[in-house]
Amino acid sequence: MKTIIFLLIFLFFCACSSYETKESKIEKLPVASELKKAENNNGQPLPKENPPSPASPMGLAVQSMKKAQDDMSQTIKLLEELRRGDQILDFRNNRTSAFQTLQTFFGVSFLGYDEHRFWFLAQNDQKVGLYEDDGFLEKGTIGLFMSFKRFIAVQRKGQKTTETEFYVDTTKKDLMVHRYRNQNTTNENYVLSGK
């Protein structure tokens, strides 16, 4: 549903940006002061359009489109930042904001979080994330790697540092996880259950 709304809005903006008018065919609309004069001359106020009720189907559609527009603007802003390079997220000082950015980057249907941790939603309701035994999630880096969205998480426990790399192909719904602990490396593959 969000994809359809996104495409409709995207096509609308594309059509608006490529539409050209000739100066001679432009009809000038009355200015607000002219409308007030017309109202005063007739003695009757001009009818105003009421916005649709939030409970009506039209109101729900408007709310849904506004939410989709906000989601798209956040995603576009994030992608513009990523074009300049990888973005580092600070989980130590601004945990909630970092989790929100992470969820915006991967998508709500692929990634969930609470106040302490995050997880990818794999098939069979399996949650794939970091191992809490490896320590506190201190920082992470999101970026694009070939056709994958990438997140590199850095955990610290005392002097020990653990890095975990998550690679997501959102079109194929594949998740690859590489865990680097001490001198050991483990690789895991999952299929995500998101849309």
Image (tube, grey):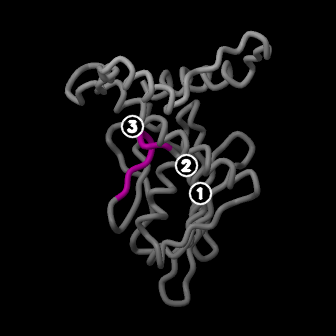
Q: CA distance from mark 2 to mark 1?
A: 10 Å
Residues 159 and 80: in front is 80
**Mark seen at residue 105:** 2
Compared to residue 155, the image places residue 109 above or below, namely above
Image quadrant containing the N terminus: top left
Residue type for callout 3: Gln
Reading the chain from its start, which is encountered first: label 3 or label 2?
2
The image quadrant that residue 148 belongs to is top right
**Residues under numbered marks 2 and 1 in contact, where contact means CB atoms less than 8 Å apart:** yes
Q: Does 111 appear in magenta?
A: yes
x and y percentages locating residue 39 in the rendered image: 38, 23
Q: Which residue is mark 1?
A: 151
Determine whether the residue tagged by mark 3 lies in a helix, strand or loop.
helix
> Quick one: label 3 or label 1, which is nearer the N terminus?
3
Quarter of the image where the C terminus is located: top left
Where on the picture, by quarter, is residue 160? bottom right
> Which residues fall within the magenta stretch?
107-113
| Residue occupying the point 45% across, 57% down | 100
Of badges 3 and 1, nearer the viewer stands 1
Q: Residue drawn 44% across and 77% down?
A: 136
| Image point (46%, 38%), residue name | 192
Using residue 92 as the reference point, say whether residue 20 is left or right of it.
right
- Residue at mark 3 to residue at mark 2: CA–CA distance: 20 Å
Vertical comparison of 108 with 181: above or below? above
Residue 123, disc: 3
Of residues 68 and 187, the one nearer the viewer is 68
**Identity of the amino acid at label 1?**
Phe
Q: What is the crowding at mark 2: few (fewer than 14 residues within 10 Å), some, or many (at least 20)?
A: many
Find residue 176 and report its horizontal and vertical position in percent.
57, 47
Label whose residue precedes the other's in the sequence (2 or 1): 2
